[in-house]
Image: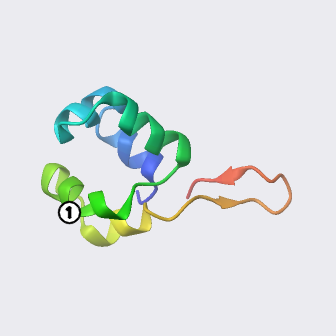
Amino acid sequence: MTNALGIIEQQGGTRPFAKKLGLPPSTVQAWKTKGSFPVHRVIEIEKATGISREDLLKACLPPIADAVTKEPVHA
């Protein structure tokens, strides 16, 4: 799973993921809403979760909008 939303859910959701990172849940919720992680957090998230840096970098890209529906597509 390489999108931010999927990774957050895989880690137990917003609050557990935030706790694992030592961040406020509102920070993780903002990432979830945006659909991507900030690049400067990749190493920190990698250390806390064991998810590869490569997968986390993919999750730093914003979701691609579906050309037909204009809705974000979460791969």
The foreground one among 6 and 22 is 22
Instruction: Say what amino acid the circle numbered 1 marks.
Output: Ile
Residue 75 location, x and y as percent? Answer: 55, 58
- Which residue is found at the position 24% from the left and 66% from the top? 52
Residue 34 location, x and y as percent? Answer: 54, 47
7 with respect to 47 (left or right) = right
Residue 32 location, x and y as percent? Answer: 47, 41
* Position above or below: 35 against 17: below
Residue hosting label 1: 43
28 with respect to 44 (left or right) = right
Residue farthest along the right direction in this orientation: 68
74 with respect to 48 (left or right) = right
Residue 6 location, x and y as percent? Answer: 43, 47
* Position above or below: 1 against 24: below
Instruction: Specify the color scheme.
Output: rainbow
- Which residue is found at the position 39% from the left and 57% from the top? 38
Circle 1 SS class: helix
52 with respect to 1 (left or right) = left
